[in-house]
Image: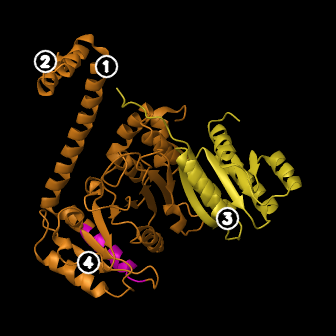
Amino acid sequence: MPAKARPKPVRVLIAKPGLDGHDRGAKVVARALRDAGMEVIYAGLRQTPAEIVRAAIEEDVDLVGLSILSGAHMALFPQVLRLLKKEAGGKIPVFAGGIIPDEDARRLRRLGIRAIFGPGASLAEIVRIAEQLARGKA
Amino acid sequence: MSRAGPAGEAEAIVGGDRRALARAITAVESGAGSAEALLQKLFPRTGRTPVVGFAGPLGVGKSSLLNLLVAHLRSLGKSVGVVAVDPSSPFSGGSVLGDRIRLERRADDPDIFFRSMASRGAAGGLSASTRDVTRLLEAAGFSVVLVETVGSGQVDVAIRGVASTRVVVLVPHLGDEVQTLKAGLFEIADVFCINKSDLPGAEAAERDLADLASLGPSPDGWRARIVRTSTITPSGIPELWKAIEAHEKFVATSPGHAAELRRRLEEEIVGRARDRLTAELAARLEVDPALRRLVDRVMARELDPRTAAERLLAAGRR
């Protein structure tokens, strides 16, 4: 008889691609997800797309959250999506936050970023969407 | 787990498939039945790899030290599997696993594997499944496995039963020499590492630890080594690895240590049996009406808990 299976907590990777050092938003979101009972792997600043994807695979996460304020999102997010697809079969949903103009946000959603949060987004809403994405219900 | 079943999974992990390894770790962590069959298959491949545990208070620089040690091991041509444990919240069950931010490596280096784990309510500085996860890393063929424990207090010594070499990481000015005599963390060290030794006070810390080591070897005959490191300058990393290697060599050849290994496996077997028994007895108590009446009688003070426990055990043996 196997040991009783425990309910599996959601594992989420929070990473900052690009070269800006503004990680307060990423930390606030990491803490909110922690308080919602998730295991948050905080990968920190200045991660390349390859490093982010490598971490997502090794940590076997259910969800990846990207934060960026440098303006390089149109260069970096598609790279993360492409590598995730190649290395992990593209099954891990990705959400994002930062300073992202509406038009870019629309294009990024078409490319496969599942949700995008700008300044002023409510933490409760971010947690709710993250939970849905991680459990495959969004 | 894949459709290939435990045999296919085991083959993939041994063959170097890192995604299979990562998924297996998740299965082990969540106590999935498929993980037990997999661990059974892989167990014969374990027990030959150095598993080096790092314990010590929070903020002494364990993660930074591990990052430099990983780089040093890679320069020696060794592949490295790392598992780093951080605490789960006793309130929400969630956690922020932040040991990964210290890791600097080429993203395309396949010979490093880093996994963060949450303690998920276990005491002692590890999670309940850390031992099994180190075994997965051993079976995956890494030449060294490193385990970073939760920033620990004086009695967080769970690493004792998991690692083949235990490094206790300290910094200058943690306390006077009497601290080193106290039971707990200081007893489990095969190697003492005085990190941040670029700070004043490192010599005094080394002197205190040397006094402790001079009081006598541990029961298996090993005398703890002391190494000074700094991740700023950086210095002492090759010396740290040499001290770890010396203990690994001792472990491989000392008869005293074979007895210690046997004792640890006995502890693990009894612990696993106890966990199973506890779960079975709790389940029995829940479903059996006669046993539920036992609890009623204890509630009414007609029966004492000790006698009720005897009857529960007797019912379990029938």
Which corner quadrant of the image does residue A52 belong to? bottom right
Q: Residue at x 27, y 66 (%)?
A: B248
Q: Nearer the viewer, mark 1 or mark 2?
A: 2
Residues at discs 1 and 2 both on one chain: yes
Q: Decide which of tag 4 and tag 1 comes sooner along the chain.
A: 4
Q: Looking at the image, which is closer to me, A49 or B199?
A: B199
Q: In the rendered image of this protein, does residue A122 appear above or below residue B239?
A: above
Q: What are the residue bounds of the magenta stretch?
A: B235-247
Chain B palette colour: orange
Percent from the top left, x then y, of residue B226?
26, 77
Chain colored yellow:
A
* Mark 4 residue type: Ile
Q: Nearer the viewer, mark 4 or mark 2?
A: 2
Q: Residue at x 27, y 13 (%)?
A: B288
* Mark 1 residue type: Glu
- Give the CA separation, mark 1 to mark 2: 20 Å
Residues at discs 3 and 1 both on one chain: no
The dot on residue A48 is 3
- Give the CA separation, mark 4 to mark 1: 52 Å
- Give the CA separation, mark 3 to mark 4: 38 Å
Q: Chain of mark 2?
A: B
